[in-house]
Image (spheres, grey):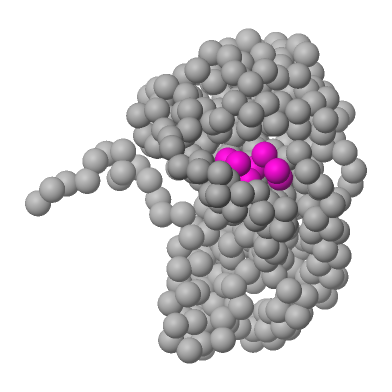
Amino acid sequence: MLKTSQTLNRLSESATLKMANLSRELKAQGKDIISLSLGEPDFNAPEHIHQAAKDAIDQGFDSYPPVPGYLDLREAICLKLKRDNGLDYKPEQIVVSTGAKQSLANIFLAFLDPGDEVILPAPFWVTYPEQVNMTGATYVPIYTTVEENFKVTAAQIEAAITPKTKFLVYSSPSNPAGSVYSKEELAAIAEVIERHPQVYVVSDEIYEYINYIGKHESIAQFDSIKDRVIIVNGQAKGFAMTGWRIGYIAAPLFIAKACTKLQGQFTSATCSIAQRATIAALTQDLKPTYEMRDAFKKRRDMVVDLLNDIPGVKSNNPDGAFYVFPDVSAYFGKSYNGETIKDSDDLCMFLLNEALVATVSGAPFGTPESIRISYASSEENLREAFKRIKAALRKLA
């Protein structure tokens, strides 16, 4: 029998996709599942983006694009970075990929070797450690709590750095906790990175536009470390373009060249039509994006109120993204119908089977005391889901 590779054996299945697939299977069996597992806006991409894609088809954009993306798209990304973030990049420093997930994979595969270390503040997105594992490198988690708003300090990062550290990887706004780092917090982290010249920062800014507290802050704004920062961003969250599969990096030139070389042997360029539509997304009206953000903020407020009404559940008040990440450890050790809830994995399965609500365990995010709940769903669905969750948890004793 053909054996799978050690690379594959080091990987775990995506926890979010696994729960989403299980939800679909139960729905197909006729069960009334409310799925709050996937991080996908329940909006359509704005009409001007759709029209740009249609125009691209009519204009015959049928051929292979350049591996790092069309030049005018990379120019549009540079304009966006200047307009929104005050950052200066050149088109040759931009690499467009098939989603931000591929952007991250490019970075890790191009620069990590066995023995290297990657610092991951927890909670972290489930894909970070798996992609690091794929290279044979080791990830080093830094644990946080709901009381700390799930944010690490500069001192914690410095304590985790060793001679083997190659990357610090974090997201702001955060998936799964919705935490947003302030300019002052990032300045303190930048000072630490400045003292350790072997450490590069991968700044995942995919939720940039879903920020409820004002201007998005990027760690690339600090000149002392900008040449060691790799920004990862994309179209999925802020423009409701999850299926269009557009991600990109803005990075020092040698990193952009390395990622282009790697991508040229995997996928080459991403979809030509999606690229043309992305130019419209980045350069035309952002009003629909901000309207979507405002809708998410309204849901956030509602969901936090609903969570606070459930005994034993502790939640922060997320400043961005569209998730809540409550600490549910008060329910560990409780039982129902002879089944004991040992951990967040068990609790998620209990909620799926008893409440017919799909959530995601916090364990693969590095925080097993919590569960992730996406509020990228209608207010009606959310109210019903939390009604069911509260009723189900009341049964545990």
Q: Nearer the viewer, residue 84 or 106?
A: 84
Q: Residue at x 52, y 52 (%)?
A: 364
Quarter of the rendering containing residue 249: top right
Q: Nearer the viewer, residue 119 or 132?
A: 132
Give coordinates of residue 147: x percent, y percent. Answer: 79, 51
Indicate whether 170 appears above or below 47.
Answer: above
Q: Is residue 154 magenta?
A: no
* Residue that extends furthest to the left in the rendered view of this protein: 1
Q: Residue at x 82, y 33 (%)?
A: 84
Q: Residue at x 56, y 81 (%)?
A: 33
Q: Which residues are magenta?
A: 275-281
Left or right of 73? Residue 286 is right
Indicate whether 221 appears above or below 282.
Answer: above
Give coordinates of residue 72: x percent, y percent. Answer: 64, 29
Q: Nearer the viewer, residue 181 or 109?
A: 109
Residue 124 at least partly seen = no
Q: Main SS of the magenta segment?
A: helix
